[in-house]
Image (cartoon, grey):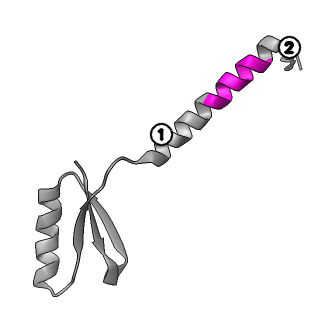
Amino acid sequence: MKALLIVAALNMQLTYDDMSVCKQAQAELTKNSIQSICLPKGKDTKTDDMFSTFMDMIVQIKKLEKEGALDNSK
């Protein structure tokens, strides 16, 4: 699972491939007296939502074409 490193003082949000790598980065920051936190990143839903919206639009266009509401000859 990807991990998100948040460093509020530097306005940074970095994504790491796993929690252990995030913890290593966090340890380096802590050595420099910079507070940070590692959180599980979770799933990126923006991409999924955008793809779902696009597919819904295609389905609606196909439906309108079948009903004859769209004229493709122009």
Residue 60 within the segment the image draws in magenta: yes
Residue nearest the viewer, comparing 74 with 38: 38
Q: Residue drawn at (25%, 51%), measured in percent from left and top?
A: 2
Q: Is residue 69 left or right of residue 1?
A: right
Task: Give the crowd class for mark 2: few <14, some 14-19, many >=20 residues within 10 Å.
Answer: few
Q: Is residue 71 left or right of residue 25?
A: right
Q: Amino acid at mark 1?
A: Asp
Q: Is residue 74 above or below residue 12?
A: above
Q: Is residue 21 above or below residue 61?
A: below
Residue linked to disc 2 = 68
Residue linked to disc 1 = 48
Q: Position of residue 32 (x, y in %)?
A: 14, 85
Q: Residue drawn at (66%, 26%), measured in percent from left and top?
A: 58
Query: Could you tell me which secondary element the residue under label 1 belongs to?
Result: helix
Read off the magenta span: 56-64
Residue 37: quarter of image: bottom left
Q: Position of residue 55 (x, y in %)?
A: 59, 29
